[in-house]
Image (spheres, rainbow, N blue to C red):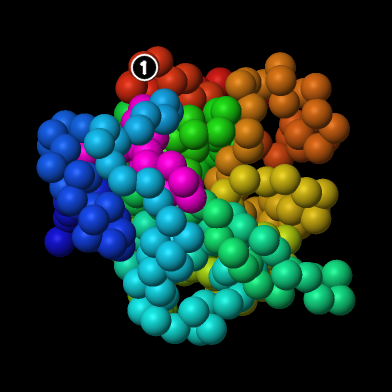
Amino acid sequence: MSVSWEGRFEQAASLLPRHLRQGLFSLPPEQKARTEEIRLRTGRPVSLNIDGRETGVPGGPAVTEGDLRLVLELASQSSVHAVLDRIRSGFLTLPGGHRMGLCGTVAVRDGAVESVRHLTSLNIRVAKEVRGAAEPVLPRLLEGGTLLSTLIVSPPGGGKTTLLRDLIRLLSQGGAAEPMRVSVADERGELAAVYRGMPQMDLGPHTDVLDGCPKAEGLTMLLRGMGPQVLAVDEVTARGDLRALMDAAGCGVSLLATAHGAGAEQLRQRPLYRLMLREGLFRRLVVIHREGGQRRYEVEVL
């Protein structure tokens, strides 16, 4: 069942101790719906990221390290050891698809992060599915019922993942075209938000998700094992990702990916993306412009 944005905010805020969440539950519904993140820092009141701007919650008590430990225990259902691998990566996927990042003193063994101790801050990113966000865009990415390989770009926080998630859902369920088999390499759990084996986000009925695997390896595994028509990945950042995408393109698979940037010209100034564009991996570029609390999608032909 679909949950309202206000309901998702309250679901995320329920992870906080009572004395911290009381002020959040009393906020106006419109403010709850627009909140993107709930941030907790030791010695500071709880703050909210609303439409990309951080603001404090008036009259709230200062957060203690004990509060942060309690939130982590609640998020892991008192089984911190069971989610240690995720903690090493700096985040946890929570019920409902919410995501919690954490900072503190890192314990390192043999050059690898072992755990995070003495927590100093937590960031709960409120999960939001914007169903229908991609409906105006998708027809411009199709040709003869086939998806043209598409790269989505925006600065951080611009809405790339939200648009990508809805494109996956629409392609998988069909409508603008016949339903397609979509395979998703979800390294950081942001697209499907798999929690205990169950995706918390709707990616459609013909979608297969590989969760927590490094992107390059995940893309290769999906290409070899799942027979996708569309291969989707969030945030291409390394040459290994690029090589895996090139292999998939050579097999006739359509690609869906995102990258940080303000547009094609900025991408061409960076070696990895310049190579990606020169190789002709993508036929369409979707640039997201954020104007106030609204997003506008510009589709360019590559």
Residue situated in front as seen by the camera: 69 or 74: 69
Q: Report x, y in % for residue 30.
A: 16, 32
Q: Report x, y in % for residue 212.
A: 58, 69
At 67% across and 61% down in the image, what residue appears? Answer: 105
- Can you see residue 220? no
Image quarter of the N terminus = bottom left
Residue 166 falls inside the magenta stretch: no
Check disc 1 and give the amino acid type. Answer: Gly
Residue 49 falls inside the magenta stretch: yes
- Can you see residue 88? yes
Taking 247 as reference, is 109 above or below it?
below
Would you name the residue on which mark 1 appears?
292
Q: Secondary structure at mark 1?
A: loop
Q: Which residues are magenta?
A: 32-51
Q: Report x, y in % for residue 214.
A: 68, 65
Figure quadrant of residue 210? bottom right
Image quarter of the C terminus = top right
- Number of callouts in the render? 1
Figure quadrant of residue 196? bottom left
For residue 160, side relative to residue 234 (left or right): left
Q: Residues within 10 Å of mark 1 (few under 14, many from 20)?
A: few
At 77% across and 23% down in the image, what residue appears? Answer: 268
Taking 241 as reference, is 282 above or below it?
above
Taking 147 as reference, is 96 above or below it?
below
Q: Report x, y in % for residue 265.
A: 71, 17
At 39% across and 69% down in the image, what residue appears? Answer: 70
At 74% across and 53% down in the image, what residue appears? Answer: 241
For residue 100, side relative to residue 253 (left or right): left
